[in-house]
Amino acid sequence: MKIKTCENGLRVFYDCRPDSRSATVGIWVASGSKNENDRNNGISHFIEHILFKGSKSRTGFEIAESMDEIGAIYNAYTTKEYTYFYVKALDYQLIKAADLLFDLFKNPRLDENDIETEKGVILEEIAMCEDDPSEKCFDVNEKGIYKGSGLAYEILGTKETVSAMKKEDFLSYMGTYYVPERTVIGVSGNFKQEEIEEKIKEYFGSDENTENFIKTGNEPFCPDVRTLTKDVEQTHILMTFRGIPVEHEDLYPLQICSFVLGLGPSSLLGRRIREELGLVYGIESFLVRFAGGGTIEISMSLAPASEEKAVRECLGIIKNLESSLTERQITIAKEKLASSFIMSRENPQSKFSATGYNMLLLNKEITDDEIIEAVRGVTLDDVKRVAREYFNISEMSFTAVGKVSPKEKYKKIISEFIKEGE
């Protein structure tokens, strides 16, 4: 893979694979809800939508028709830290596909009528997420634990902020964040580098560096008990512990610990709470990582009648996590982790997406060999250490959405386990 940093700060990587018959161009820009405020929350996601409504020289329909004409696949998505646009086409159609993608990205139409129409689409998307208690549980959780940080904002924004957005807001925001030093372009598949380089230069070569570089600070973590009542059949619960940022030396030991705790029916939580007691349909432990912080999440959905028993069982397993870890569990989890990483990266699109993400936030590529070596180097002592350091019930945040119990009931249960550990 070839990596190039242009004079204006734009970073480009080329992953040429001559055995492929297709190629993909992606654009990652460090613009997400983390960069927003109370007035413009949701604008990063709105921009993702509105750019596909057309450029200054092509209507949205003309762009869609032109993409279909060359058989291209294109899409975009927004996260809390970045927005990603991509197009994939047969190798001989790549330059046409890239031209269309770069045109809508660099020369957005931003028509007032389109903006008003798309507001309706996004408001429906917000309503759909409001109706999903599982999604709402994550929103309530993040709004609380990241209080005071941009990470507390919901990606979609609110009905009030989205409804109030105007063309001027998009122009101002894009002028600040859609800049070369916050952008990565990637090309993967079968292509001629000199041809795509010329197309990138045509659209991005005259951009000036604004020195609005990606900044990383320590994100807050505010533990508490949070609830939201919703008229649904199940209660959705998140137990959240302070985690680690995107780049951290404890990544692989903590991933392995999380796998042992709650990935699949053979995990500690899966075996006890689902398989033996039948209290939940699914329970899972996983890491969420951002540039300046992260969390360890335990997620489950269950009937209100099973809630207290499941919470107590879960807390008991967490409390005894360090002492219950065995060499065999770690060996199994290491193989599961290595295979999940590598198998996902054998999917060209998945690997391409991960490479762009790493280039944007870490400014480097992470190879398969590096991952395997790091995973296999983790010891039982490493995993016991992270279990002791990170899974502290006294610093845990608890969120429940659905047919919830009173907060005091949850606090009482949690405090009992904290006192037992003193």
Image (cartoon, grey):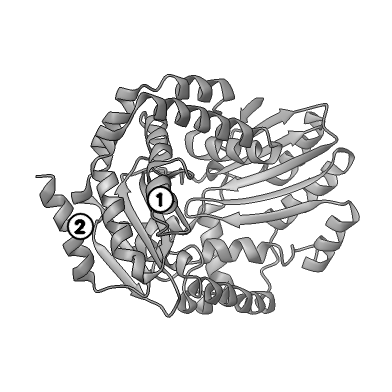
Seen in the image, is 285 located left or right of residue 92?
Answer: left
Q: From the image, tell me which residue sits under label 2.
A: 414
Residue 409 drawn at (x, y percent):
20, 68
SS at badge 2: helix
Q: In terms of depth relative to the viewer, which is nearer, 281 or 159?
A: 281
Above or below, 244 relative to 121? above
Seen in the image, is 100 located left or right of residue 176?
Answer: right
Q: In terms of depth relative to the viewer, which is nearer, 87 or 236?
A: 236
Above or below, 185 relative to 14? below
Q: Which mark is residue 402?
A: none
Seen in the image, is 136 located left or right of residue 29?
Answer: left
Which quadrant of the structure image shows residue 341?
top right
Count how many numbered circles sit on residues in the image: 2
Identify which residue is drawn at 72% across, 46% down: 203
Q: Earlier in the sequence, mark 2 or mark 1?
A: 1
Which quadrant of the structure image shows residue 261?
top left
Residue 375 drawn at (x, y percent):
46, 25
Neighbour tally class for label 1: few under 14, some 14-19, many 20 plus, Cα within 10 Å: few
